[in-house]
Protein backbone atom coordinates (compact mmCIF):
# COMPACT_ATOMS: atom_id res chain seq x y z
CA UNK A 1 0.00 0.00 0.00
CA UNK A 2 1.29 3.44 -0.76
CA UNK A 3 1.61 6.25 1.71
CA UNK A 4 -1.13 8.06 -0.13
CA UNK A 5 0.20 11.44 0.91
CA UNK A 6 2.49 13.91 -0.74
CA UNK A 7 5.27 15.14 1.48
CA UNK A 8 8.55 16.89 0.99
CA UNK A 9 11.20 16.11 3.60
CA UNK A 10 13.77 18.87 4.02
CA UNK A 11 17.16 18.21 5.66
CA UNK A 12 20.50 19.92 6.19
CA UNK A 13 21.94 17.27 3.87
CA UNK A 14 20.56 14.65 1.52
CA UNK A 15 22.96 11.82 0.60
CA UNK A 16 21.33 9.96 -2.31
CA UNK A 17 24.21 7.38 -2.63
CA UNK A 18 23.95 7.53 -6.43
CA UNK A 19 25.04 11.13 -6.89
CA UNK A 20 26.74 13.76 -4.72
CA UNK A 21 25.38 14.98 -1.35
CA UNK A 22 22.97 17.92 -1.53
CA UNK A 23 23.22 20.66 1.09
CA UNK A 24 19.89 22.08 2.22
CA UNK A 25 18.34 19.17 0.36
CA UNK A 26 14.86 17.75 0.07
CA UNK A 27 13.15 14.56 -1.01
CA UNK A 28 9.66 14.77 -2.49
CA UNK A 29 7.49 11.72 -1.86
CA UNK A 30 4.25 10.79 -3.58
CA UNK A 31 2.29 7.65 -2.83
CA UNK A 32 5.25 5.95 -1.13
CA UNK A 33 7.66 6.68 -3.95
CA UNK A 34 10.43 9.22 -4.42
CA UNK A 35 9.48 11.73 -7.11
CA UNK A 36 12.28 14.26 -6.73
CA UNK A 37 15.62 14.71 -4.96
CA UNK A 38 16.91 18.27 -5.11
CA UNK A 39 17.68 21.35 -3.05
CA UNK A 40 14.95 22.57 -0.72
CA UNK A 41 14.78 25.79 -2.76
CA UNK A 42 13.91 23.80 -5.87
CA UNK A 43 11.26 21.81 -4.06
CA UNK A 44 9.64 24.59 -2.06
CA UNK A 45 6.17 23.23 -1.39
CA UNK A 46 3.31 23.81 0.97
CA UNK A 47 3.65 20.38 2.60
CA UNK A 48 7.36 20.76 3.37
CA UNK A 49 8.34 18.96 6.54
CA UNK A 50 11.60 20.36 7.86
CA UNK A 51 13.59 17.68 9.70
CA UNK A 52 16.30 20.21 10.60
CA UNK A 53 19.92 19.26 11.27
CA UNK A 54 19.77 15.74 9.89
CA UNK A 55 21.27 13.79 7.00
CA UNK A 56 18.75 11.94 4.86
CA UNK A 57 19.99 8.64 3.47
CA UNK A 58 18.39 5.58 1.92
CA UNK A 59 17.29 3.20 4.68
CA UNK A 60 19.96 0.77 5.82
CA UNK A 61 19.87 -2.79 4.48
CA UNK A 62 20.63 -5.59 6.92
CA UNK A 63 21.62 -8.39 4.57
CA UNK A 64 21.95 -11.09 7.21
CA UNK A 65 20.24 -11.60 10.54
CA UNK A 66 18.24 -14.09 12.59
CA UNK A 67 15.54 -12.11 14.40
CA UNK A 68 14.32 -15.22 16.23
CA UNK A 69 17.54 -15.19 18.29
CA UNK A 70 17.01 -11.62 19.51
CA UNK A 71 16.23 -12.71 23.06
CA UNK A 72 19.75 -14.18 23.35
CA UNK A 73 21.43 -10.78 23.51
CA UNK A 74 24.63 -10.98 25.53
CA UNK A 75 24.02 -14.46 26.96
CA UNK A 76 26.36 -16.51 24.78
CA UNK A 77 30.09 -15.84 25.06
CA UNK A 78 31.96 -15.71 21.73
CA UNK A 79 35.51 -15.48 23.05
CA UNK A 80 36.17 -19.21 23.16
CA UNK A 81 35.39 -19.55 19.47
CA UNK A 82 32.61 -20.49 17.09
CA UNK A 83 31.99 -24.18 17.80
CA UNK A 84 31.57 -23.82 21.60
CA UNK A 85 29.25 -20.85 20.90
CA UNK A 86 27.23 -22.89 18.40
CA UNK A 87 26.98 -25.76 20.85
CA UNK A 88 25.62 -23.51 23.62
CA UNK A 89 23.22 -21.91 21.15
CA UNK A 90 21.91 -25.30 20.03
CA UNK A 91 21.46 -26.39 23.66
CA UNK A 92 19.50 -23.23 24.48
CA UNK A 93 17.25 -23.65 21.46
CA UNK A 94 16.58 -27.27 22.38
CA UNK A 95 15.78 -26.32 25.99
CA UNK A 96 13.19 -23.67 25.07
CA UNK A 97 9.89 -24.45 26.81
CA UNK A 98 7.63 -22.72 24.28
CA UNK A 99 9.73 -22.13 21.18
CA UNK A 100 7.03 -20.43 19.12
CA UNK A 101 6.25 -17.92 21.85
CA UNK A 102 9.97 -17.26 22.34
CA UNK A 103 10.32 -16.75 18.60
CA UNK A 104 7.40 -14.37 18.45
CA UNK A 105 8.74 -12.20 21.27
CA UNK A 106 12.23 -12.26 19.76
CA UNK A 107 11.11 -11.31 16.27
CA UNK A 108 8.94 -8.45 17.51
CA UNK A 109 11.79 -7.10 19.66
CA UNK A 110 14.23 -7.48 16.78
CA UNK A 111 11.94 -5.63 14.38
CA UNK A 112 11.50 -2.75 16.82
CA UNK A 113 15.24 -2.47 17.37
CA UNK A 114 15.96 -2.68 13.64
CA UNK A 115 13.49 0.08 12.78
CA UNK A 116 14.85 2.33 15.54
CA UNK A 117 18.37 1.86 14.17
CA UNK A 118 17.36 2.98 10.67
CA UNK A 119 17.22 -0.47 9.08
CA UNK A 120 14.31 -0.44 6.61
CA UNK A 121 14.86 -3.84 5.00
CA UNK A 122 16.33 -7.03 6.37
CA UNK A 123 17.18 -10.51 5.16
CA UNK A 124 16.07 -12.77 7.97
CA UNK A 125 16.90 -16.46 8.32
CA UNK A 126 14.42 -18.56 10.27
CA UNK A 127 13.92 -22.16 11.32
CA UNK A 128 10.19 -21.52 11.72
CA UNK A 129 9.17 -19.76 8.50
CA UNK A 130 5.43 -20.26 9.02
CA UNK A 131 5.62 -18.43 12.37
CA UNK A 132 8.09 -15.72 11.44
CA UNK A 133 6.59 -14.80 8.06
CA UNK A 134 3.25 -14.08 9.68
CA UNK A 135 5.02 -11.59 11.97
CA UNK A 136 7.08 -10.05 9.18
CA UNK A 137 3.97 -9.59 7.06
CA UNK A 138 2.58 -7.34 9.82
CA UNK A 139 5.50 -4.97 9.28
CA UNK A 140 6.84 -2.45 9.99
CA UNK A 141 9.78 -3.26 7.72
CA UNK A 142 10.51 -4.67 4.30
CA UNK A 143 11.87 -8.22 4.56
CA UNK A 144 13.28 -11.13 2.65
CA UNK A 145 12.55 -14.23 4.74
CA UNK A 146 14.86 -17.19 4.18
CA UNK A 147 13.52 -20.49 5.50
CA UNK A 148 16.39 -22.51 6.91
CA UNK A 149 17.08 -26.08 5.84
CA UNK A 150 19.06 -28.41 8.11
CA UNK A 151 19.39 -32.03 7.03
CA UNK A 152 22.45 -34.04 7.97
CA UNK A 153 23.16 -37.53 9.30
CA UNK A 154 20.25 -38.93 11.29
CA UNK A 155 18.03 -35.96 10.35
CA UNK A 156 18.82 -36.03 6.62
CA UNK A 157 15.27 -37.32 6.07
CA UNK A 158 13.91 -33.89 7.06
CA UNK A 159 15.24 -32.38 3.85
CA UNK A 160 12.01 -32.32 1.89
CA UNK A 161 9.75 -31.06 4.68
CA UNK A 162 12.24 -28.29 5.56
CA UNK A 163 12.62 -27.36 1.93
CA UNK A 164 8.84 -27.24 1.44
CA UNK A 165 8.46 -25.00 4.50
CA UNK A 166 11.26 -22.73 3.30
CA UNK A 167 9.71 -22.46 -0.17
CA UNK A 168 6.34 -21.62 1.36
CA UNK A 169 4.55 -24.74 0.09
CA UNK A 170 1.03 -24.64 1.50
CA UNK A 171 1.58 -21.31 3.24
CA UNK A 172 -0.73 -18.49 2.20
CA UNK A 173 -0.04 -14.86 1.69
CA UNK A 174 3.59 -14.60 0.70
CA UNK A 175 4.90 -13.08 -2.47
CA UNK A 176 7.82 -15.07 -3.81
CA UNK A 177 10.28 -14.59 -6.58
CA UNK A 178 13.82 -13.43 -7.00
CA UNK A 179 12.54 -10.05 -8.07
CA UNK A 180 9.63 -8.35 -6.32
CA UNK A 181 6.44 -8.63 -8.31
CA UNK A 182 5.38 -5.04 -7.70
CA UNK A 183 6.26 -2.07 -5.57
CA UNK A 184 3.74 -2.82 -2.84
CA UNK A 185 5.40 -6.17 -2.09
CA UNK A 186 7.21 -5.76 1.22
CA UNK A 187 7.74 -9.43 2.10
CA UNK A 188 9.50 -11.94 -0.12
CA UNK A 189 10.75 -15.42 0.66
CA UNK A 190 13.81 -17.50 -0.06
CA UNK A 191 15.59 -20.74 0.79
CA UNK A 192 18.58 -21.07 3.09
CA UNK A 193 20.48 -24.33 3.26
CA UNK A 194 22.13 -23.53 6.60
CA UNK A 195 25.74 -24.52 5.87
CA UNK A 196 27.97 -27.20 4.34
CA UNK A 197 28.20 -28.95 7.73
CA UNK A 198 24.46 -29.09 8.41
CA UNK A 199 23.26 -29.97 4.91
CA UNK A 200 24.86 -32.81 2.94
CA UNK A 201 25.94 -32.25 -0.68
CA UNK A 202 22.80 -33.93 -2.07
CA UNK A 203 20.71 -31.63 0.12
CA UNK A 204 22.63 -28.57 -1.06
CA UNK A 205 21.92 -29.65 -4.66
CA UNK A 206 18.24 -30.11 -3.86
CA UNK A 207 18.07 -26.59 -2.37
CA UNK A 208 19.74 -25.11 -5.45
CA UNK A 209 17.39 -27.04 -7.75
CA UNK A 210 14.29 -25.90 -5.84
CA UNK A 211 15.50 -22.29 -5.89
CA UNK A 212 15.92 -22.57 -9.64
CA UNK A 213 12.47 -24.09 -10.20
CA UNK A 214 10.66 -21.61 -7.98
CA UNK A 215 12.76 -18.51 -8.78
CA UNK A 216 13.48 -18.05 -5.07
CA UNK A 217 16.72 -16.49 -3.84
CA UNK A 218 19.23 -18.43 -1.74
CA UNK A 219 21.25 -17.72 1.36
CA UNK A 220 23.92 -19.97 2.82
CA UNK A 221 26.40 -19.59 5.68
CA UNK A 222 29.63 -20.25 3.81
CA UNK A 223 33.32 -20.31 4.69
CA UNK A 224 32.40 -18.91 8.07
CA UNK A 225 35.06 -20.71 10.15
CA UNK A 226 38.30 -22.63 9.77
CA UNK A 227 36.47 -25.62 11.27
CA UNK A 228 34.03 -25.62 8.35
CA UNK A 229 36.87 -26.17 5.90
CA UNK A 230 38.23 -28.98 8.10
CA UNK A 231 34.79 -30.53 7.89
CA UNK A 232 34.34 -30.32 4.13
CA UNK A 233 37.93 -31.15 3.15
CA UNK A 234 38.54 -33.79 5.84
CA UNK A 235 41.85 -35.07 7.16
CA UNK A 236 43.98 -37.89 5.83
CA UNK A 237 42.10 -41.19 5.84
CA UNK A 238 44.22 -44.01 7.27
CA UNK A 239 43.79 -47.52 5.85
CA UNK A 240 40.36 -47.03 4.42
CA UNK A 241 38.96 -45.47 7.60
CA UNK A 242 36.75 -42.39 7.27
CA UNK A 243 38.71 -39.11 7.41
CA UNK A 244 38.78 -36.94 10.55
CA UNK A 245 36.39 -34.04 10.12
CA UNK A 246 37.36 -31.88 13.09
CA UNK A 247 35.34 -30.04 15.77
CA UNK A 248 32.12 -29.72 13.73
CA UNK A 249 31.98 -33.49 13.33
CA UNK A 250 32.39 -33.80 17.10
CA UNK A 251 29.61 -31.24 17.52
CA UNK A 252 27.26 -33.30 15.34
CA UNK A 253 28.24 -36.43 17.28
CA UNK A 254 27.48 -34.79 20.62
CA UNK A 255 24.10 -33.73 19.23
CA UNK A 256 23.53 -37.38 18.34
CA UNK A 257 22.94 -36.36 14.74
CA UNK A 258 26.10 -37.77 13.15
CA UNK A 259 26.11 -41.08 11.31
CA UNK A 260 28.81 -42.65 9.19
CA UNK A 261 26.88 -42.07 5.97
CA UNK A 262 27.60 -38.32 6.10
CA UNK A 263 29.73 -37.88 2.98
CA UNK A 264 33.08 -36.11 2.95
CA UNK A 265 33.10 -33.93 -0.18
CA UNK A 266 36.86 -33.27 0.00
CA UNK A 267 36.30 -29.76 -1.31
CA UNK A 268 36.75 -26.35 0.23
CA UNK A 269 33.39 -24.81 1.17
CA UNK A 270 33.31 -22.37 -1.76
CA UNK A 271 34.26 -25.10 -4.26
CA UNK A 272 31.58 -27.35 -2.80
CA UNK A 273 28.94 -24.63 -2.99
CA UNK A 274 29.85 -24.00 -6.62
CA UNK A 275 29.69 -27.69 -7.50
CA UNK A 276 26.29 -28.01 -5.86
CA UNK A 277 24.88 -25.10 -7.86
CA UNK A 278 24.48 -22.76 -4.88
CA UNK A 279 26.51 -19.88 -6.32
CA UNK A 280 23.88 -17.98 -8.27
CA UNK A 281 23.50 -14.29 -8.93
CA UNK A 282 20.62 -14.23 -6.42
CA UNK A 283 22.54 -16.02 -3.66
CA UNK A 284 23.66 -14.29 -0.47
CA UNK A 285 26.77 -15.86 1.04
CA UNK A 286 26.74 -15.09 4.75
CA UNK A 287 30.24 -14.37 6.13
CA UNK A 288 32.77 -15.77 3.60
CA UNK A 289 35.39 -15.23 6.31
CA UNK A 290 37.84 -17.89 5.12
CA UNK A 291 38.37 -17.60 1.39
CA UNK A 292 41.40 -18.21 -0.84
CA UNK A 293 42.30 -16.20 -3.93
CA UNK A 294 40.73 -18.99 -5.99
CA UNK A 295 37.54 -18.80 -3.89
CA UNK A 296 37.29 -15.06 -4.50
CA UNK A 297 37.60 -15.71 -8.21
CA UNK A 298 34.89 -18.38 -8.11
CA UNK A 299 32.50 -16.11 -6.20
CA UNK A 300 33.21 -13.17 -8.49
CA UNK A 301 32.48 -15.20 -11.61
CA UNK A 302 29.25 -16.57 -10.14
CA UNK A 303 27.73 -13.17 -9.35
CA UNK A 304 26.86 -14.35 -5.81
CA UNK A 305 26.80 -11.67 -3.11
CA UNK A 306 28.75 -11.60 0.18
CA UNK A 307 27.14 -10.45 3.42
CA UNK A 308 30.03 -9.48 5.68
CA UNK A 309 29.06 -9.27 9.36
CA UNK A 310 31.85 -7.07 10.75
CA UNK A 311 31.29 -7.11 14.50
CA UNK A 312 30.29 -10.77 14.62
CA UNK A 313 33.43 -11.51 12.61
CA UNK A 314 35.43 -9.61 15.20
CA UNK A 315 33.68 -11.26 18.14
CA UNK A 316 34.89 -14.69 17.04
CA UNK A 317 38.44 -13.45 16.49
CA UNK A 318 38.73 -14.53 12.85
CA UNK A 319 41.68 -13.32 10.74
CA UNK A 320 40.99 -10.09 8.79
CA UNK A 321 38.05 -10.28 6.39
CA UNK A 322 38.99 -9.90 2.72
CA UNK A 323 36.10 -7.59 1.82
CA UNK A 324 38.36 -5.01 0.17
CA UNK A 325 39.88 -7.64 -2.13
CA UNK A 326 36.38 -8.94 -2.84
CA UNK A 327 35.20 -5.47 -3.81
CA UNK A 328 38.31 -5.13 -5.95
CA UNK A 329 37.32 -8.39 -7.70
CA UNK A 330 33.87 -6.85 -8.32
CA UNK A 331 32.06 -9.02 -5.80
CA UNK A 332 29.01 -7.25 -4.41
CA UNK A 333 29.83 -7.06 -0.67
CA UNK A 334 27.10 -5.87 1.67
CA UNK A 335 26.67 -5.74 5.44
CA UNK A 336 24.79 -7.91 7.91
CA UNK A 337 24.59 -7.79 11.67
CA UNK A 338 23.97 -11.51 12.17
CA UNK A 339 21.93 -12.16 15.32
CA UNK A 340 22.00 -10.74 18.81
CA UNK A 341 23.40 -14.10 19.92
CA UNK A 342 26.76 -12.94 18.53
CA UNK A 343 26.40 -9.17 18.08
CA UNK A 344 25.57 -6.28 20.42
CA UNK A 345 22.98 -4.63 18.16
CA UNK A 346 20.96 -5.03 14.95
CA UNK A 347 22.16 -1.67 13.64
CA UNK A 348 23.80 -1.57 10.22
CA UNK A 349 24.84 2.00 11.02
CA UNK A 350 26.75 0.64 14.04
CA UNK A 351 28.48 -1.84 11.70
CA UNK A 352 29.44 0.96 9.28
CA UNK A 353 30.77 3.10 12.13
CA UNK A 354 32.80 0.12 13.34
CA UNK A 355 34.22 -0.30 9.82
CA UNK A 356 35.02 3.40 9.64
CA UNK A 357 37.07 3.11 12.85
CA UNK A 358 38.77 -0.13 11.79
CA UNK A 359 39.41 0.80 8.15
CA UNK A 360 39.75 4.59 8.01
CA UNK A 361 41.25 4.40 4.52
CA UNK A 362 38.19 2.81 2.97
CA UNK A 363 36.26 5.67 1.30
CA UNK A 364 33.12 6.56 3.27
CA UNK A 365 31.10 6.28 0.04
CA UNK A 366 32.16 2.63 -0.20
CA UNK A 367 31.03 1.92 3.35
CA UNK A 368 27.70 3.65 2.78
CA UNK A 369 27.10 1.63 -0.39
CA UNK A 370 27.85 -1.59 1.49
CA UNK A 371 25.13 -0.65 3.98
CA UNK A 372 22.56 0.46 1.41
CA UNK A 373 22.73 -0.08 -2.36
CA UNK A 374 24.93 -3.20 -2.28
CA UNK A 375 22.55 -4.78 0.22
CA UNK A 376 19.58 -3.91 -1.96
CA UNK A 377 21.31 -5.55 -4.92
CA UNK A 378 22.12 -8.67 -2.89
CA UNK A 379 18.45 -9.02 -1.97
CA UNK A 380 17.26 -8.41 -5.56
CA UNK A 381 15.57 -5.20 -4.49
CA UNK A 382 17.81 -2.55 -6.05
CA UNK A 383 15.24 -1.45 -8.59
CA UNK A 384 13.10 -0.21 -5.71
CA UNK A 385 15.46 0.73 -2.86
CA UNK A 386 19.10 1.26 -1.87
CA UNK A 387 19.43 4.84 -3.09
CA UNK A 388 17.33 7.98 -3.19
CA UNK A 389 16.24 8.74 -6.70
CA UNK A 390 12.99 9.38 -8.54
CA UNK A 391 11.20 6.13 -9.33
CA UNK A 392 12.43 4.28 -6.27
CA UNK A 393 10.47 3.71 -3.07
CA UNK A 394 10.77 6.22 -0.23
CA UNK A 395 12.69 3.99 2.20
CA UNK A 396 14.60 6.69 4.02
CA UNK A 397 16.52 7.23 7.25
CA UNK A 398 17.29 10.55 8.93
CA UNK A 399 20.51 10.54 10.96
CA UNK A 400 21.24 13.60 13.13
CA UNK A 401 24.03 15.83 11.79
CA UNK A 402 26.47 16.37 14.65
CA UNK A 403 27.10 20.11 14.44
CA UNK A 404 30.38 19.70 16.35
CA UNK A 405 31.55 16.90 14.00
CA UNK A 406 33.24 16.82 10.57
CA UNK A 407 31.60 18.99 7.92
CA UNK A 408 31.37 16.24 5.28
CA UNK A 409 27.88 14.80 5.86
CA UNK A 410 28.86 11.20 5.27
CA UNK A 411 31.95 11.33 7.50
CA UNK A 412 29.80 13.14 10.05
CA UNK A 413 27.27 10.29 10.10
CA UNK A 414 29.97 7.61 10.21
CA UNK A 415 31.92 9.19 13.07
CA UNK A 416 29.13 10.33 15.37
CA UNK A 417 27.34 8.14 17.89
CA UNK A 418 23.91 9.69 17.34
CA UNK A 419 21.01 7.33 16.69
CA UNK A 420 18.67 7.84 13.72
CA UNK A 421 15.95 10.42 14.26
CA UNK A 422 13.42 8.89 11.85
CA UNK A 423 12.96 6.01 9.43
CA UNK A 424 10.42 5.66 6.63
CA UNK A 425 9.32 2.66 4.58
CA UNK A 426 7.48 3.60 1.39
CA UNK A 427 7.05 7.08 2.79
CA UNK A 428 5.42 5.92 6.02
CA UNK A 429 7.24 6.80 9.21
CA UNK A 430 8.18 3.59 11.04
CA UNK A 431 10.50 4.90 13.74
CA UNK A 432 10.85 6.23 16.30
ZN1 LIG B 1 23.81 -16.27 10.41
Image (tube, rainbow, N blue to C red):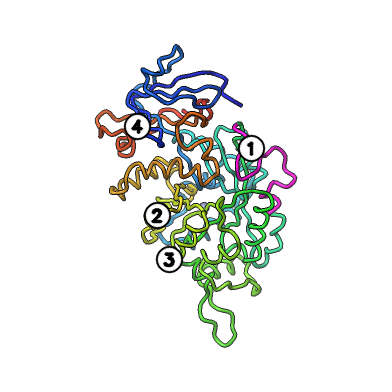
Q: Which mark's residue is nearer the viewer, 4 or 3? A: 4
Q: Looking at the picture, does residue 399 appear above or below residue 287?
A: above
Q: Secondary structure at mark 4?
A: loop
> Which residue is the site of mark 3?
292
> Which residue is the site of mark 4?
21
* For marks 1 and 3 on the same chain, the one whose residue lies earlier in the sequence: 1
Q: Where in the figure is residue 208, as x and y percent of width and height? A: 63, 57
Q: Which residues are magenta?
A: 163-183
* For marks 1 and 4 on the same chain, the one whose residue lies earlier in the sequence: 4
Q: Where in the figure is residue 397, as x and y percent of width and height? A: 44, 31
The answer to whether residue 153 of the structure is visible from this angle is yes
> Which residue is the site of mark 2?
323
Local packing at callout 4 (Cα closer than 10 Å; few below 14, some 14-19, many 20+) is some
Q: Is residue 212 left or right of residue 369?
A: right
> Which residue is the site of mark 1?
181
Q: Which mark's residue is nearer the viewer, 2 or 4? A: 4
Does 179 lie within the magenta span? yes
Q: Main secondary structure of the magenta part?
A: loop
Residue 53 or 364: which is nearer the viewer?
Answer: 364
Marks 1/3: CA–CA distance: 37 Å
Marks 2/4: CA–CA distance: 25 Å
Amino acid sequence: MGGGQNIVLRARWVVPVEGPPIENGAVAIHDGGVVAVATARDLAATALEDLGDVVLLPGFVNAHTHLELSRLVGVLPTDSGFVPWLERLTAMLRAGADPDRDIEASVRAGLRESAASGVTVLADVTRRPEVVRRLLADGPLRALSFGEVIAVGRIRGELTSRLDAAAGVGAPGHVGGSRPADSSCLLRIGISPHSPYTVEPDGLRACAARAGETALPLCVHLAETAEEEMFTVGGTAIEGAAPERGPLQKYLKRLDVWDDAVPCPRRRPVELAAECGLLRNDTVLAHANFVSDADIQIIAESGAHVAYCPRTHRAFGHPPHRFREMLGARINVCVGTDSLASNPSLSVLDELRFLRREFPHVPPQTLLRMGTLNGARALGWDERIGSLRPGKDADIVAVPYDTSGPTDPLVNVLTSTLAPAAAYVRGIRRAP
